[in-house]
Image (cartoon, rainbow, N blue to C red):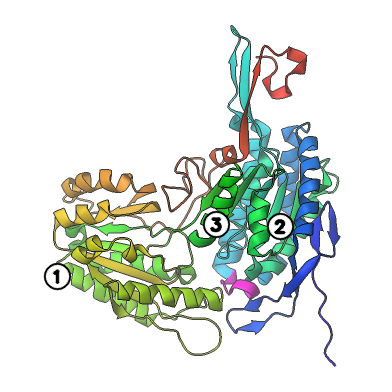
Amino acid sequence: MQTAVATAKVWIGGEWRESDAEGVFEPENPSTGEKLGREFPVSRWSDCDRALTAALEAAHELEQIPGEKIAAFLDAYASELDAGAEAVVQAAHDETALPVSPRLKDVELPRTTDQLRQAAAAARQGSWRRVTIDRQKNIRSGMAPIGPVVVFGPNNFPFAFNGVSGGDFAAAIAAGNPVIAKAHPLHAYTSQLMAEAAARALKGSGLPAATVQMIYKVNHETGLKLVSDPRIGATGFTGSKGAGMKLKHAADEAGKPIYLEMSSLNPVVFLPVGLKENTQKWAKELGDSCTAGSGQFCTRPNLAFLIASDATESFLREVATAFDSREAHALLSSTTRDQLHESVQALKAAGATIVTGGRNLPGKGYRYASTLLRVTGKTFISAPHKLQREAFGNEVMAVVVADEDELVKALDQLEGNLTGCVYSVASGADDGLHARLEPVLRRKVGRLLNDKMPTGVAVSPAMNHGGPYPATGHPGFTAVGIPAAITRFTALHCYDNVREERLPLFLRGE
């Protein structure tokens, strides 16, 4: 007799409670395609409504709570995650097929707890408030919490961008906002364990019980209603362009801020003198970057620009050989694999040719052959929109241009991206061409790199993890980098001729 699986509870108003669910879903192990034996609810609007009401009450309380208490919660949460690392890492491995070591245990989880601690430091220090005092006119202003924040986590980072632990979460909490986390269904149990750690950290913190809440999944209509509700201050979203733009439209119509991280192809330009001297080295670096995590990073290269030459042909052969010789690891889901194949076929239909890959791999789980495509610069310039379709996974397309002039024209056709990179020779022989290309590429990207693949995103105050549309919804903000990331979830409050004792604490005195 088969034992019934208990459906997980949602976390609303400081309690784990039965969801008012319209259905359930079961996460799979993408390495095997097998169900993991856990059920999670698809919440109706009533769950969201209760969470919003509780969050609004919490927001009013948080306005009066000093940053030190908020910081203490974030620090305690980071410590809880450290203490429960083994269980949460195993859960994430089971749900995503991402390797335990080094990816989850040694890189992503420490990055996540470091980010929480950096947010705690910012909450204590308060520089994100940008206090401005004009004593002559008796006007004071500064940034303050914007109100309840909804965070939609993506599929590819179960810790660092999770709705209940990631960068948007940390930034919103540091500013004194309550967060309603919408977990990603592909790592629901991981999110549950992290939310339980947050719940333990909240006990005794002095913060409202509804400072953090979490639901697992909603239908499209409920999601649109959630981001446009009058009780919401702002939304943070990381995911696909299609889903992001629908949420943006709903939020914009309601006049609600929404900060989106969406599609990015992250072009890498290989300059000719350096390519001739570093063919194998650069090919390995590109191959490593495109296949790490099966290419499921928002900053992995999808486009490589090269000027036609013998060195270029050697380089592409090296990349193809690297792709063919490496085992392709599991993608996050069957949907991820289907969408990757659809994108590869669409690029082929637009004029690209497949050098290697371009097919599903047999066996258990969801694997796809690492794929290299190529297209001429002339073709790319003639159909730039179709040939800038994102292929999320272990894929890259080489754009082989005829000369320097065509390279400039091709780069000028780029849409907005998170990153752009130029590889050049150390001797300076490529400097003249770099100087010509850099202004064109600079306008198209949020972060410009030299001689370094863009895959890593350091948690640094100087980092920009943003960029022009469609990489994000606004080029003036970053999703990574404290304290800059905090300002997305703040509102500018100004006090004109208000008595000292009536001012908020952060605007009193000097």
Check disc 3 and give the amino acid type: Lys
Numbered label attached to residue 459: none
Instruction: Name the residue tied to disc 1.
Output: 310
- On screen, residue 219 versus residue 324, left or right, reads right
**What amino acid is at disc 1?**
Asp
| Disc ID at residue 246 | 3
Query: Which percent across, then down, holds residue 254?
Result: 61, 44
* Magenta stretch: includes residue 188: no
Q: CA distance from mark 1 to mark 2?
A: 51 Å
* Residue 240 appears in view: no
SS type, badge 3: helix
Which comes sooner in the sequence, label 3 or label 1?
3
Query: Where 328 falls versus 375 (above or below)?
Result: below
- The residue nearer to you, when weighing 463 against 243, is 243
Q: What is the span of residues highlighted in magenta in the rendered image? A: 94-100
Residue neighbourhood size for the residue with mark 2, other residues' Cα within 10 Å, grouped as few (<14), some (14–19), many (≥20): many
Q: Is residue 233 above or below residue 143?
A: below
- The residue that disc 2 covers is 81
- Locate residue 64, reporting x and y percent: 78, 31
